[in-house]
Amino acid sequence: MPVTIGVPVLALFLQAYVPRRLPFFSIFDLPLLVTIFFAMARRNPISGLFTGAAIGLAQDMLGAYPIGIYGIAKTVVGYGASSLGAKLDVENSGARLLVTLGFYLVHAAVYFTVARGMVNLTLNWSWSRGILAGLANGVLGVGLYFLLDKFKQRT
Amino acid sequence: MESFLGRYRNLTILVGVLFLQLLGLAVQVKRSSDPENTRLIRIWAVDAITPFERVLVWVQTGSGNLWHNYFYLRGVRAENRQLRQELDQMRLDQVRLSEDAEQAHRLQKLLAFKEQVIGKPLAAQVIGTSGNDLSQSIYIDKGSNEGVKPDMAVITSGGIVGKVLHVYPTTAQVLMINDQTSGVGAMLEKTRVQGVLKGTPDGSVVLERVMGDEKVSPGDTILSSGGDQIFPKGLPAGTVTKVSPGHEMFLNIQVKPAADLSRLEEVLVVTERQQRQVAVEDSGRVRAADILAQRLPSVPDKAAVAAAAPISGAKTTSGQNGSAGSGLPATGSGAAKPQIVSNPAAGASTSPALGSGKVTTPGGTVADASGTHNGSVAGQASGGQTTKKSATNTTASAPASNVSPAKSTDTSSASSSAKPIAVPPKPGNQQSKSSPPAPQPPAAEADPH
């Protein structure tokens, strides 16, 4: 339980704090990685979507846009990751990298769709940047998942 | 239906969660389009957070106020009392400094004036008055210990004040010029007409012994002529305020004293006059033509000088033109009106009533004619001061004549106010009497005073 709450809170804190010191860190999405991890680890779509919804709404709280954009996107990611984790072996690092890359793109797609369609935000999508950011998050996710696997094994 | 929900349970929950979030987002977006409304969740967040902030601020403010309004203010009453004392002290200091500043300003003017005054002035403070309306006199804080002597001139930066009447070890009494018993040799600045500045019983000042045919107008400046041997020549004495015909042939000239005699605080006592002035007067007579020759640029004419020497009997060591040396009429290009006085009574017109001060006798010597404290000398006596200017350059061994160039003493004004008068030479005796100016009262007239 402490890990379930503490890790997402720590991820939100780092996502809000580190880019102030390291601007390039904004390319990463730690709450998304945590959502994917918990969703795939628990392999329960209901748990995954609620985890994604909670983390997404919390992330919306830190931003300036209307609350719910990240929530919807991470709900979808959590549901999909938990569903995928229940059907596939996601313990492999390569699979985790591809899963993370795929869900990053899904997350971005949902986010852009909601932001443009409902909130009428002006956002520009770049495939190169999207793929590059997905790969970066995948690489970071592989390492993060490795660390989080330690906590999973302890619990 | 139940089987459908059971079969697609996860998907149904997902759709439900997404629907709720979309609904909430739609609500936010709709409300955000209305600028008057605020997102409800923001309001809730603010309502949830601000009470804690208010409590925190209240505690912080209360503790701060408690510190600043009680603990920190301990001893404020004593501090307030101390500050009030300091304020009172500073007010007193301010008044004192203001007085000092005004005094410094006056002293600065006095010092600037002091540098221009002939002789050696001594600064003194006015410490009192006579306390009598009929006697216009003051007391100063300098006396015989500081070298003050009777008949010394007392002046300010504004003008002349009076003369020292009585001297005590540490104080002295000064008779002001508006006292009815005082008299000052004065002259009009423009016309150089001389007269006697006297006080009246009511404390005003008049200029007497100015002939009725002289042009005197209100606003004219009156200077000390120096003939009374008390006041240095050229000091501001007053300003003509009113001119009216007086008794006999003289004008009645009302004068406003240059110095504010009613508000005297610091004065200067002229303790020492220029030594060369006395030396000149003791040196004997100097001819008016010689004085003029000294002042006018000329080319020495040896032949003329040689020819003139036997006639005039004068030995001149400086460049003098022939006409001057020969005693010819001293028509001066730009020369003033020299007066050669031969009549002792006229040349040293001294009124007994006015008559303190030193009088230049026809012999060129200076006699102390002071018998009373309230003396003044008519303007003719100013000749001695004029002659001193040329005495340094001229050695006159010729038959002396008491030259009283009453209207030529001021070289700066001599050219502008020149009244060339031909002085007929008298062989064997250079002394002649020309028509004296207005302040030259006849001897018979001077006696009654």
Image (cartoon, coloured by chain):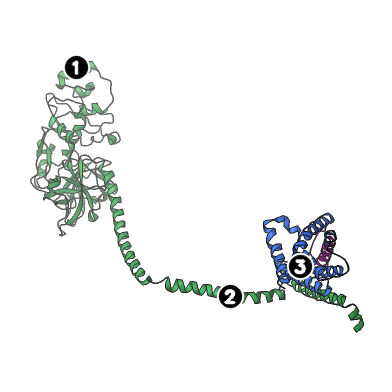
Few, some or many residues within 10 Å of mark 2 (<14, 14–19, 20+): few
Residue hosting label 3: A153
Q: Position of residue B168 (x, y in %)?
A: 11, 51
**Quarter of the figure that contains the N terminus of chain A:** bottom right
Q: For the residues marked 3 and 1, what is the alpha-carbon distance in whole angstroms?
A: 146 Å
Colour assignment, chain A: blue
| Labels 2 and 1 share a subunit | yes
Amino acid type of the residue that numbered disc 2 sits on in the rendered structure: Arg
Pinpoint the chain carrying mark 1: B
Q: Position of residue B188 (x, y in %)?
A: 25, 43
Q: For the residues marked 3 and 2, what is the alpha-carbon distance in whole angstroms?
A: 45 Å
Colour assignment, chain B: green
Marks 3 and 1 close (CB-CB < 8 Å):
no
Mark nearer the N terminus (2 vs 1): 2
Q: Which is in the foreground here, disc 3 or disc 2?
A: 3
Q: Is residue B435 visible?
A: no
In this rendering, would B333 be left or right of B173? Answer: right
Marks 3 and 2 close (CB-CB < 8 Å):
no
Magenta region: which residues? Answer: A101-125
Residue B307 circle label? 1
Q: Which is in the foreground here, disc 2 or disc 1?
A: 2
Marks 2 and 1 close (CB-CB < 8 Å):
no
Pinpoint the chain carrying mark 2: B
Circle 3: element type: helix
Compared to residue B96, the image places residue B327 above or below, namely above
- The residue under the point 76% across, 58% down is A27
Pinpoint the chain carrying mark 3: A
Residue hosting label 2: B54
Image quarter of residue B314 = top left
